[in-house]
Amino acid sequence: MAAQKINEAHEHIAKAEKCLKTSMTKWKPDYDGAASEMAKAAVAFKNAKQFEQAKDAYLKEAEYHTDNKTLFHAAKAYEQAGMMLKDMKKMPEAIQLIEKASIMYVENGTSGTAGMALDRAGKLIEPIDLEKAVDLYQKAASVFENEDRLRQAAELLGKSSRLLVRLRRLDEAAVSLQKEKNMYKEIENYPTCFKKTIAQVLVHLHRGDFVAADKCVRESYSLPGFSGSEDCVSMETLLAAFDEQDEDQMSRVCNSPLLKYMDNDYAKLAISLKVPGGGGGKKKKSPVAPQEGSAGPPPAEQDDDYEGGLC
């Protein structure tokens, strides 16, 4: 069966070469015919599990389509060549060809196809190279954003944000989450905005930036339905516990179903969140007793009336 397919492939290659020949009566090569024959050869090689030869045939097809100025079909052939490299476990080279295809899709005016190709490439590379996956998802999001397809752009930014958290690139994750949230706000998907606010708070607290976390919640009060919602109350409670170093209260919020059942990367941020200072925080309703031999209560609590400033 494989030998038959290989022979079939070589027959198509011979026909492709014939299409390219010129003569006294045929002044121009038939690039369209050659590309069609090469595509058939590639499929035959693929069915025979000859992925290297299938890849070469797809690259030839892409070349003929480029000569014929049919860029969309050239891009498709480059993408197919990339998939052959994927089957050969040559993932970086595969991604390179898919990226090349995406550029050609954009040049051809089919940006949506480019975005989907970059998304597929991101999924392929994610198990072995998170950094590259982030890059691909961000590029895909940018393509969709330029097309005003904000829902797709936001979903791809969401993938990027989660991977940035996993990579502990929290400053970039914070920027990405804000952009996501703005997009969801623009398309009036407010419940998703609430979830992005929770993710923002967790990221900012892990960055040690309480002010930024608090600002994200305050800005969300303008979102219809946020004020008084479970998401809002939970974040207000978390911020108060963090600020007061109330370890018990913070643990209750971080282990609540609302946070535990978020996307895994954010759920991990929640359960690993600690009160600032690294001293384990304080237990609620457990006042610190004076140390033995000391002459009275500790002075640290005296200025609490003005904690956080006068405003």
Image: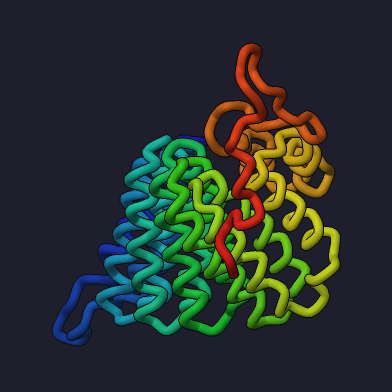
Residue reaching furthest to the left: 24
* Frontmost residue, 9 versus 64: 64
* Quarter of the image where one finds residue 302: top right
Residue located 35% across and 73% down the image: 104
Q: Position of residue 159 (x, y in %)?
A: 57, 55
Count of numbered marks:
0
Most foreground residue, 242 or 72: 242
Direction front: furthest residue: 295
Residue 94 screen position, x and y as percent: 38, 48
Colouring style? rainbow
x 33%, y 53%: residue: 96
Q: Which corner quadrant of the image does residue 248 belong to?
A: top right
Q: Nearer the viewer, residue 159 or 261?
A: 261
- Which quarter of the rendering shows the N terminus? top right
Q: Is residue 183 left or right of residue 32?
A: right
Rendered position, 299 above or below 73: above
| Residue 98 place in picture, x, y as percent | 40, 58
57 on left or right of 47: left
Q: Position of residue 149 (x, y in %)?
A: 58, 80
**Residue 4 appears in view:** no
Q: Residue at x 46, y 74 (%)?
A: 143
Q: Is residue 285 above or below residue 62?
A: above
The quarter of the picture where the C terminus appears is bottom right
Residue at the spot 39% in from the left edge and 48% down from the top edge:
132
Horizontally, is 282 left or right of 125 in the view?
right
Query: Would residue 216 be seen by someone viewing this image from the given angle?
Result: yes
Q: Quadrant of residue 196?
A: bottom right
In-front residue for pair 137/103: 137
